[in-house]
Amino acid sequence: MSEREQTPQVGEATIAEFSASLRGTVTQPGDAGYDTARAVWNDMIDRRPALIAHCSGTADVIAAVQFARSNDLPIAVRGGGHNVAGNAVCDGGIVIDLSPMRAVQVDPARRVARAQGGATLGDVDHETQAFGLATTLGMVSQTGVAGLTLGGGLGWLQRKYGLACDNLIAADVVTANGQLARASAEENPDLFWGLRGGGGNFGIVTSFEFRLHPVSTIFGGALMYAGEEQIRKGLRFYREFSLAEPDELTTIAELGVAPPEEYIPAEFHGQLVLWIVLCHCGDQEAAEECARPLRAFGPPAVDLVGPMSYMELQTMYDTTFPAGQRHYWRSAYMRELSDATLDMLVDQMIKRPSELTFIDLHHMGGAVGRVGADATAFGHRDAPFLIDPVPTWTDPTDDERAVAWGRGVAAALAPHSSGSYLNFLAVSDPEASRTSYEAATYERLAALKAKYDPTNVFHLNHNIPPRP
């Protein structure tokens, strides 16, 4: 039996009719390019959809939703395909692929950008930076705007300007009944609330409108500290330093392995090191003053901090996160960081499953923490820290060991954690999703799901089942 004969119980004539109705194209098993089209960023994900509908616009998305519902096909939605859980692809269903929809339009006078649902962070940054404008959008330019924003959206500007979802002004959404809805503070405000942190549960967003801010040249980069004693002291120093940061400064402390790069002295190659990565989006003199304690501590073995373009910082992590690696991410919001917790992170990194593995410690707060807990669906805004253990590897034979390490770090953090960040969840199940929200928020989301998607059409995501 051929691959195509094993695909869904949908007749060839029906599929042909659907394909002819689209401005985009349809890919099936056996077609040229099928394996490329079903591949996503996390190489652990190996799923075989029955159909992939490459949509050219909103009309195609509407047609794809209606076709899927008429033929009882599970729906996966692909934006940038960068989600660690692999939610962009499914087995045996239809992938509604928005990746051809990457247009970005900027209104510099109003400081607003409109991005289609398949756009990446790099697409948005390329257009907005032409006018010296930016908005909070992640830290890896290949990431899709849609998944990032719907899950909340950390980024280098978050402490000054809030999360990606905080800068969302409006969205066009194809809902489960195959209709287009506008979501904003004025139109369908309940849906607008849910889109800002509630994930892909309420529909397929075909366009986003973002508030922009004047950001062009920033003061940023990374400082590296080496030696186990220095690393342990450095984490304690960072804990105190970060709590005194101004809003203009966003930082991450990262435990990782020094790569064999020319800018790193050879004696540190392959060694466990501590990076403190920063972005100051304000006055340059003030930024230099902010960095002074970081340079005085240690001192750092490597200093890569200075004025740079915002685009330089936004693409700095791109080579760290190429497609084709294997990932299992977890996360933990932390209201306090004890010495024991920090030491545990170092101890776990000494036992790391691969040289690509790292642990990020994000400092939250600032504008993120000043948004009301019920203003958006995004949860745990009061937590000052987010820890993200990131086992990353390339050999499938290392899967069991790497996943076990990630779960072990998550289990050690769990007794001290208030919850998890939706976009850093490597598993997709309702119980995992629940940890990303306070109880009242989760119940409100479940009720909203019942209103907009009562039969859980959009369930191949970080799912929130509709409340009965």
Image: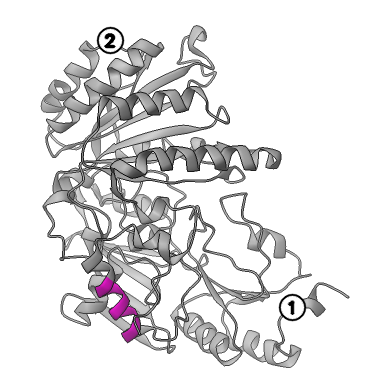
Q: Which residue is mark 1?
A: 7
In this figure, which residue is indicated by the disc labeled 2? 298
Of the residues shown, which amino acid type is indicated by label 2? Gly
From the viewer's perspective, tell me whether residue 124 is left or right of residue 42. Answer: left
Question: Secondary structure beneath disc 1?
Answer: loop
Which of the two residues, 198 or 248, is positioned nearer the viewer here? Answer: 198
Instruction: Indicate the position of residue 136 as horizontal and vertical percent values.
Output: 27, 50
In the figure, is residue 53 to the left or right of 108? right
Residue at screen point 18% across, 44% down: 159
Q: Residue at x 16, y 63 (%)?
A: 110
Q: Residue sitting at 15 percent across and 38 percent down?
A: 248
Q: Earlier in the sequence, mark 2 or mark 1?
A: 1
Q: Give the residue displayed 24% in from the left and 53% down from the top.
A: 163
Tell me where the magenta segment starts and ends, as one range.
Answer: 443-451
In this rendering, position of residue 306 left or right of residue 159 = right
Identity, as a three-letter code, of the amino acid under mark 1: Thr
Q: Quadrant of residue 94?
A: bottom right
